[in-house]
Amino acid sequence: MRLTIQMLISHGRVARKMGLGPESRINMLRNILTGLVRHERIETTRGRADEVRFYAEKLIDYAKKGDTDEKAMKMANFWLTEKDLIPKLFKVLAPRFETQPKAYTRMARIPNRENLDKAAMAVLEYKGNPFPPLQTAKRDNDLTLINQLLKGYREQRAQQAAAKVEA
Amino acid sequence: MACRTVCQLLQRRLASSAASVRLSAAEERGRRSAVFSREQARQRSLYPRTEKIEVTLQIPGLQGTLLVMNKGLSTPHSCARHLTEWYVTSSALALVDGKPWSLHQPLTQSCSLSLLAFKDTDPLLVNQAYWRSCAALLGQVLQDAFKEDFSVELLRLPEVLVTSGAFCCDVVLDPQLDAWNPSEESLRSLTRGAQQLIHRDLPWEPLEVAPPVALEVFSHSSDTHLRCVFIHVYGTHTHSCLTSYLSLRCGDHVLLSGGPLVARTGLCSQYEVTAIHRLGEGKWGLHRRAQGLSLPLQQQAHHTVWRKLRSRAEKLVEVPTGSTNEAISDTLTPPSAPEQTPPQQ
């Protein structure tokens, strides 16, 4: 293929490169995910935490299928390098998230690492863990002026939609 | 009791309003402002010697801090100035001993003070005060907007819930303008007038006035103004004979209000006059309801959100009338008719 300068510029490319190559990336993510399942709250660099989030949630979706499912067991076996965590996944984490459809993890950014690299760090956790709560960005309380106006707006839209359905 | 004397004064004034010269609107405003200043000076002179009062702060993080302030002179605004600049710019209303209090109203005794902002856990009082202030600003803009030949009479500033989507101001325009319907350009120029007032950052100076003074401030040779004043007040208080009315001045406009307003016009940032609807013929001519939408400096909306809220604010907002009409008819019937017994005070 043509060796253009465009190849070196990464505008718009969303896939992250980690480690030595794609296989190395998957291995790194596997290790981080195993740590997450074991400890339920871990601290890594921001990019890695963001990458692992997707796999962590997909793993829970697979675990919800139950440990009798072939595919679910194969996935759990591949992703968890420490095999004593497979029963924990199916018996503790899957039942915890039975009622939730998605959003099983929470990521909170923390100050940069103290080392020379000053890497941007983040904390990744499964919701419902036994530790004290993390402080994430606070949303404005529901009674503020703009939220009350938006609430009135939403109610009016719902009323109009209901009236249309009846008519 | 006070209500009956005021009503009797009203009857006498209505009877003798025959041949007085009508002042122009600007002169009238100047006169009202002068009476307001006189009353303000008189109330300040009630405390010739500076006496000290102790104000305990009930602010999260500063619980129990004691401030020693001057009696009759210090306001919650001056208490905020003793703290940090953030308190001065962000506080909209104060709670003195649990009662809502305007930021520029002097404190008269030792009390507990808390400063309320828009982002508190419970900003209901602040939201209502802000809505009232925006309606007052709208009334002021409408009074200023038209030329001297056309009279604009403010009927009332109804208490509307924030969730209804817009604040309203009921007015009656000159009969020559009965056929006029506001175009988009005129609404935009009204908005511009409001933005100019906001830019000037005028404080709303509150004053508790006794009924005779209120009557003097709003006395005018034309009958309709007197009626308007009491609709103004009775429109906001249902069946209560007050011993004092809360009067506020912004720039040179004086108005009566049903509750405290926020500190200054500069607290509003996004402000638009959205519509002027016709309400139909009433006792004083064609009633119109002007509506607007506004958000404070600390709660600005993205333009997409603002557009959606604005399209909602253009629709007519229904205001529950009910008791206000009865109160009006009570004040205007002659004394011979059976009067309602005022509530015991």
Image: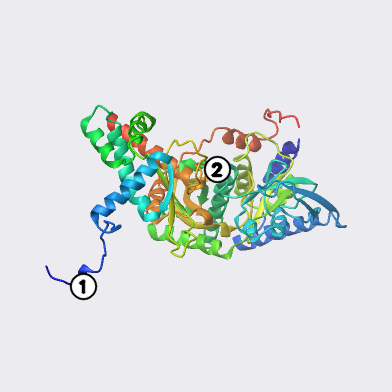
The answer to which image quadrant residue B49 occupies is: bottom right
Residue A14 seen in this snapshot = yes
Q: Which residue is mark 2?
A: B158
Of residues B213 and B293, the one drawn nearer to the viewer in this rendering: B293
Q: Amino acid at mark 1?
A: Ile
Quarter of the figure with the N terminus of chain A? bottom left
Left or right side of B334 for A97:
left
- Mark nearer the viewer, 1 or 2: 1
* Mark 1, residue position: A5
**Viewport quadrant of the C terminus of chain A:** top left
Q: Is residue B71 left or right of residue B176?
A: right
Q: Could you tell me residue B336's position as x and y percent? A: 70, 31
Percent of width and height locating residue B308: 38, 49
The residue at the point 71 percent across, 28 percent down is: B341
**In this rendering, would A84 be left or right of B257?**
left
Closer to the camera in the image, B107 or B38: B107
Asked if both marks, 1 and 2, belong to the same chain, the answer given is no
Q: Residues within 10 Å of mark 2 (few under 14, many from 20)?
A: many
* Residue B219 visible in the displayed image: no
Please tell me how many numbered marks the rendered image carries: 2
Residue type (three-letter) at the residue carrying disc 2: Pro
